[in-house]
Amino acid sequence: MKKSFSLAPVSLLAVAREAGVSRATASLVLRESPLVATKTRERVQEAMKRLGYIYNRGAANLRQNRTHTIGLVLPNIANPFFSKLTAGVDEINDTNDVVCFIANSTESVDRQARQLQRLREHNVDGVIICPAVGSCQTPLDDLKRLKLPFVQALRQVSSDDSDYVAADYATGIEKAVTHLVRTGRRRIMFVGNMNVHSAAQARCEGFMRAVALHHLPQTLIVSGGAENTYDEAVFDTLLNSSDPPDSAICYNDIMALNVMNRLQAHGIAVGKEFAVIGMDDLPQASASYPALTTIATGPRDIGRAAANLLQARLDNPERSREHIILSPQLIIRASCGENAYLG
Amino acid sequence: MKKSFSLAPVSLLAVAREAGVSRATASLVLRESPLVATKTRERVQEAMKRLGYIYNRGAANLRQNRTHTIGLVLPNIANPFFSKLTAGVDEINDTNDVVCFIANSTESVDRQARQLQRLREHNVDGVIICPAVGSCQTPLDDLKRLKLPFVQALRQVSSDDSDYVAADYATGIEKAVTHLVRTGRRRIMFVGNMNVHSAAQARCEGFMRAVALHHLPQTLIVSGGAENTYDEAVFDTLLNSSDPPDSAICYNDIMALNVMNRLQAHGIAVGKEFAVIGMDDLPQASASYPALTTIATGPRDIGRAAANLLQARLDNPERSREHIILSPQLIIRASCGENAYLG
DNA sequence: CTGTTAGCGCTTTCAC
DNA sequence: GTGAAAGCGCTAACAG
């Protein structure tokens, strides 16, 4: 199906004719070149307005081999965390006059490959990608081979030398543990241990590090699964043990809210007997009851940083690789007890 | 900045030469034309593989005046509701081999205009738009004038004859009211009355209709504001009145969760003394405590429907305008009381 | 300062 | 079945 036009689409040539100049001159006006006389410029601009001219970037792209488009490949766009990240990317793009293709890999390596292929065909200038679980090195190698600039966000497929933006999950978890310890908690669980990608691993590493540092029990770990599930049987067992945990740090806010519900169903007063900390600071963290203490990973900032980093790379392909690690912030709310800080 | 290539980018011409055929033939192979001999086809395909050929859609677009891209313009991409919608759109696009530009208007009419302009420059085949608050008819008129197919999602800028997909908010609210009445509630509030766009108006209309139908008090309306706020002073006044409300239907889930928190802070047992119903069925609705009864508006389905409708329009520009109104579903959870249905 | 010319990589008649 | 040639709308080199 071709698009049909009632009016022939007005091209630069039409504008040029209307203004009585050549296409080249009109093109210069378009790009605000100082090389063109003021009077001519105005004439051309009027002609454009009169004819309702619309710049055809597609044609320009073909010539310049640059499209002012980027691709954003995410494992789950429906997840609020990633949609905030998307908003951050969009923000930067809007100021840079670039436009963003979105692709939802839904954690499927196949689909991700298909999408990267499409993005390449559309000649995107670069790609921001949070690799789907199970991605091996190959998709990134492909990008490299094609000299398609990319930056990885949040997850690293391998510790290669590529541009990379992420939150410092480990340190975030450490901050949380430290806070719990300062407020008198000793038996701290970690709920949602997984090994699926670097971001998940980093959390557990941070937990183990902090636990070692403070000489806390190292066995209070409940594994997690897809879709924010966790091993409820193990959770209950720990809870009913003779020396039960007094607090929990969870993989993310959603899981933390689930945990809070479970605790409340057990008749445990969250925020008093038991402290709960989540991760991400989604809107529902502050809207929960009691309000959830959380480690704010700043998805929007990550998105912004990734978009800026990609832009920098596009502007200078020779610049050295950069890793941007943003520090999460602990946001203390009622789920940790009201008068939190003792020290 | 031009992109630099170590290898010259391999074009169809290169492939053709490698295979010892003409560009035209290679092009036919590309598009799986039956007109080409099997042996030739295989030779060409091998050449493509050998050279690592990548189809350049940009060039094809220029020729065909069709890009296999669409634009998705949303007022707030960070909102989980819209990100679900986006996921629905992406799903359909993936099967149709089209790719989607995302644009976040952030409810700014100016930004929205800028983005539509960019999308036109990039020659998108069509647009799915949820108009920013305050949009007047002009942006859509522009699209029409340019013969750029579009479908409106969720909000209608005016009741014009354009393609349109939305949830039947009014009926959803009615279902909720009816359910409350059946479970013995009479003094039902509506929290979050606004007049900013058609989707907000429809909710209040539905409420008023249902309230009239069941001869309920019509004054229990609390107005809402931006960012899921509501008039807390009025809310408290109603709550402390001599004949207080016994239930609330809220503009959306986020607001409902805020309302639940406020009620709990007042010492009111949500789900027993007082029923709360939200709208949208976000993940946090089921994760709240007590779990939130909600009107599921099915954003993902709306996204899918919009993408399909746009595709249908692209395939046949002459088809008559279509309005798709999806029925929301009431999802009953603990915030309405355990043994909900009496009748 | 402005115009001429030659492509970018592809598709599409139209011959052969 | 296949090839030659024209052209989509733009930009870049170069001439004047």
Image (tube, coloured by chain):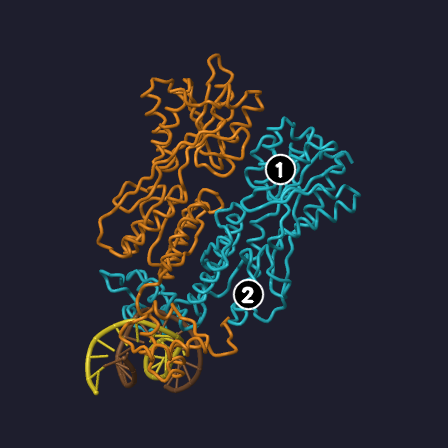
Chain colours: A cyan, B orange, C yellow, D brown
In the image, which is nearer the foreground, mark 2 or mark 1? 1
Can you say whether B306 is above or below A34 in the image?
Answer: above
Which amino acid type is marked by label 2?
Leu
Write down the quadrant of residue A235 in the picture.
top right
Relative to residue A205, is residue A229 drawn left or right? left
Q: Residues within 10 Å of mark 1 (few under 14, many from 20)?
A: few
Which disc number belongs to residue A140? 2
- Residue at 35 percent across and 33 percent down: it is B202
- Give whichever of discs 2 and 1 has the lower sequence position: 2
Q: Mark 2 falls on what kind of element?
A: helix
Residue A280 percent coordinates (x, y): 60, 44
Q: Is residue B219 visible?
A: no
Give the amino acid type for the residue marked by disc 1 in the picture: Ala
Residue on which the image places disc 1: A233
| Image-quadrant location for residue B219 | top left
Of residues A117 and B225, which is closer to you in this image? A117
Q: Nearer the viewer, residue B302 or B160?
A: B302
Is residue B342 depicted above or below A123 in this figure? above
Depicted B259 relative to depicted A102: above or below: above
**Percent position (x, y) of residue B41?**
34, 77
Pick the quarter of the image with the C terminus of chain B: top left
Quarter occupied by residue B209: top left
Chain under disc 2: A
Q: Which chain is mark 1 on? A: A
Are marks 2 and 1 in one subunit? yes
Q: Residue furthest top?
A: B242
